[in-house]
Amino acid sequence: MPQDVEFSVPFPFQVNPNLAAVRERNLQWARTLGAISSSEAADRYLFSQVTDLAAYYYPDADADDLALAYDLMTWFFQLDDKFTVPAGQHPTAAAADCQEMIRHTIGSPSSHGQDDSPLVAAFADVWARMASGMSPLWRARTAEALLEYLWGNLTEVADARCGTVLGPGAMMELRRSTVGVRISLAMGERVGHFEVPALAWSSSHLEQMRLITTDHTIFVNEVVSLEKEEAAGEANLILTLMDHHDLTRTQAIDKLVKKADTAVMRFLDHERQIPQLCERLSLSLVQSAAVRQYAALMSALIRGNYDWSRTAGRYSPEAKPLTPVAQGDVKAEGKGNDRPRGLGFSYGPTGPGTASIRTGVNYG
């Protein structure tokens, strides 16, 4: 898999020193909620290193805050796994969970406690802890980001069942909904104990920086997950570019790398203009500091996603897909899963004769 493709990411490498300790706390949390119910599943979960992404995203968070971010990553990746099913099946349980999470987000869940699937219980727990102590404005815009993400997952299911094939532009738009970057940025405010002032957060300037952060994450993800998604029959932007623009594989990869590198240069231009933005919006010193912290958070996400993607077990050659139980599969093992255990590798090739119904991916 093309993990050796290099992007230009002119931000310093950072990783949270609490990584190992928080990883164990997160594993216990996942076990308590029933998301991991066997030692075998725990081994696969730890091998995948999916939750370690939080340590790259939030290098300065203390252990308690980082634990919350790890739990968010558990939910992200287990939801994405649950949507990936063998050929001929539909992810009905995942779609039902997604709809229940939408109800939780808007404050009207239809089930509670032991009636929830482990994934819904994880979501409800993380969302409640995220929102605790945050302002109504933060909760409103974060709920909007969650809803965009959840509805985007349902769009992928609907498109797959209808046989909809997206072109590069439409695929990129859907990826922006389902990649989860906006939720991760909101978590960055939560664990960083700051909030971006409403006027600054609403500015086109910061929105452009969010879009660049999102797009760069997508470009890196499409490259590192290419071979796995190709073997699984999943959509990948590189394959779509090859089909629609008659490009070779190398040309399509180079195109995404160039787009990513250009995006980073644009990000740096916007970052240099942060002082002028704060001045023109008449922000206080405290408010201006929050905007600068938000810009630093975005650069940490860009760099963190790149470093994690190149090292995570999930994307490594050792994540063999054809073993009786795939090492990289982190799907929750509680009730309501569509797929019997051991039938495939959610983020990689599922073997001859199998295919995924996914038209898109979240984190890869």
Image: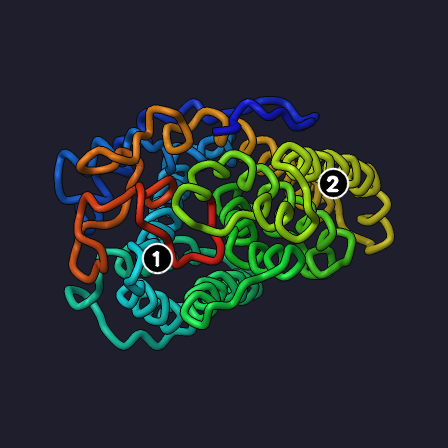
Q: Nearer the viewer, residue 90 or 293?
A: 90
Colour scheme employed for the rendering of this structure: rainbow
Cβ–Cβ under 8 Å for marks 1 and 2: no
Q: Please state which amino acid type lies under the numbered disc 2.
A: Ala
Name the residue: 74% across, 52% down: 208
Q: Which mark is residue 117?
A: none
Please tell me in which quadrant of the rendered image residue 100 appears: bottom left
Q: Is residue 232 visible?
A: yes
Q: Is 243 located above or below residue 27 in the figure? A: below
Q: Is 338 located above or below residue 186 in the figure? A: below
Q: Tag 1, which secondary structure?
A: loop
N-terminal-most mark, 1 or 2: 1
Q: Nearer the viewer, residue 175 or 108?
A: 175
Name the residue: 38% across, 40% down: 348
Q: Please state which amino acid type lies under the numbered disc 1.
A: Phe
Please tell me in which quadrant of the rendered image residue 304 appears: top right
| Residue where numbered disc 1 is placed | 83
- The answer to whether residue 48 is left or right of residue 202 is left
- The answer to whether residue 219 is left or right of residue 111 is right
Q: Position of residue 346 (x, y in %)?
A: 33, 45
**1 vs 2, front mark:** 1
Mark-to-mark CA distance, 1 and 2: 30 Å
| Residue where numbered disc 2 is placed | 263
Q: Position of residue 298 (x, y in %)?
A: 63, 41
Q: Position of residue 308 (x, y in %)?
A: 48, 30
Name the residue: 39% across, 50% down: 76
Q: Is residue 136 visible?
A: no
Q: Nearer the viewer, residue 244 or 305?
A: 244
Q: Residues within 10 Å of mark 1 (few under 14, many from 20)?
A: many
Name the residue: 68% across, 60% down: 198
Q: Position of residue 336 (x, y in %)?
A: 20, 62
- The answer to whether residue 151 is left or right of residue 9 is left
